[in-house]
Image (tube, grey):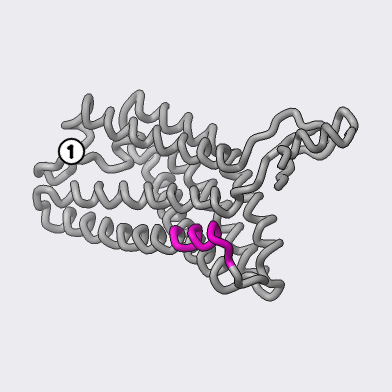
Amino acid sequence: MLPAYQRIKDEGSREDEIPLFQISFAKFSLFTVSLPLFSFIFCVIWSITFFFEQSVSTHCHVWNYLPSISAAIGAFQPQAIVWQTAIVIHFLPRLTVTWMYFNYYNRIVRRNRQIVANLAIFLNLIENVCLLGLSLYNSTDYYDYHKVFFCTFIVTSEIYMMMSYYLNLYARRDPNLNSREEKSLVLKRNLCIINVISILLATYFFIRHNDRCEGGIYTLFAFFEYIVVLTNMGFHLTSIYDFHNQYLTFDWKYGLRSWS
C-alpha cells in the first residue's frame, strides 16, 4: 500500500493539499517516548556519577545508593536543563497522541460509553500538563507547586491507565480484537498492574524511611519510583499497536491529519 502522502499526490490533489511532511505513527510514538526516557536515564546516571553524595543525601543521614527522581532531574545542572528541554519538546507530540486517542475512542467505543472515553482523554490532558509543570517547577525551589503537580500527575495517570484498559476491554463497539489489539491490551494490563504495585511500594518505603530512618530504605523508594516512571512510559508506548497502520501528515489546507 502506498503511503498516504504518495496516494494524495498521485491522485492529483491541489498544491496546498499535498502534505509538507509524513511520519508513521510508530516512529512518532517512539520519538515522543524516547525524549523523556533517555533524558531520565541520563539524569540518573549523571547524578550518580558526578553528584552522588549530594543527590542521595536525605534528612536521615543514612546510607543510600539511588537518588530520588526529584533529585535526579531537578536538583543539579546539567540534569535539570536536559530534563526540562526534553519535556518541553515532547509536550506537543504528547498532545498529538492525546488527540489521536480522542478520535480513536470516538470511533471504537460504544455511544453509551463515550462519556467515560471523554473523561479518560481529559485526564490524559491533565496528566500531560502536570508532567510539564512538575518538570519546570522543581522540588528544591518551588516545593509547593512541584508537590501539587506531582500528586495530580500520579492520580490522573493512574486513573487514565485503568480507564484506558476498561475502554479497550469492555466498551468497544466490536469486541473482537485482532492480534495487535490483543497484544496492546495485555501490555496495558500488565504495565498498569506493575505501575500500581510500584506506587504502593514506593509510598510504603518513603513513609518507612521518614519514620525509622533505616539505611537502604530510601534506595528502595527511589527504585520503585523509577519503575513507576518507566511503566508509565511503556503504557503510552502501546499506542504503537493501537495505531500500527497510521501516518501523521500535515498540509496547509487541512492541517494535521492521520491516515491509514
Tell me: residue 63, above or below residue 200: above
Q: Residue 128: x, y in percent?
A: 53, 47
- In-front residue for pair 192/130: 192
**Residue at the disc numbered 1:** 57
Image point 60% across, 45% down: which residue?
95
- In-front residue for pair 3/190: 3
Would you identify the image quadrant in which residue 198 lies?
bottom left
Could you classify mark 1 by the number of other residues whose Cα lies within 10 Å: few (under 14), some (14-19), or many (20 or more)?
A: some
Q: Is residue 237 visible?
A: yes
Image point 35% across, 41% down: which residue?
139
Q: Residue 135: x, y in percent?
A: 44, 39
Give the overall secondary structure of the magenta segment.
helix
Q: Is residue 136 visible?
A: no
Q: Amino acid at mark 1?
A: Ser
Q: Residue 46: x, y in percent?
A: 28, 28
Image point 60% across, 64% down: which residue?
119
| Quarter of the figure that contains the N terminus | top right
Query: Is residue 44 within the magenta segment?
Result: no
Q: Residue 122: x, y in percent?
A: 60, 57
- Callout 1 secondary element: loop
User: Magenta region: which residues?
Assistant: 177-187
Query: Is residue 195 shown left or right of residue 8?
Result: left
Q: How many marks?
A: 1
Would you identify the image quadrant in which residue 138 lies?
top left
Query: Is residue 235 shown left or right of residue 239?
Result: left
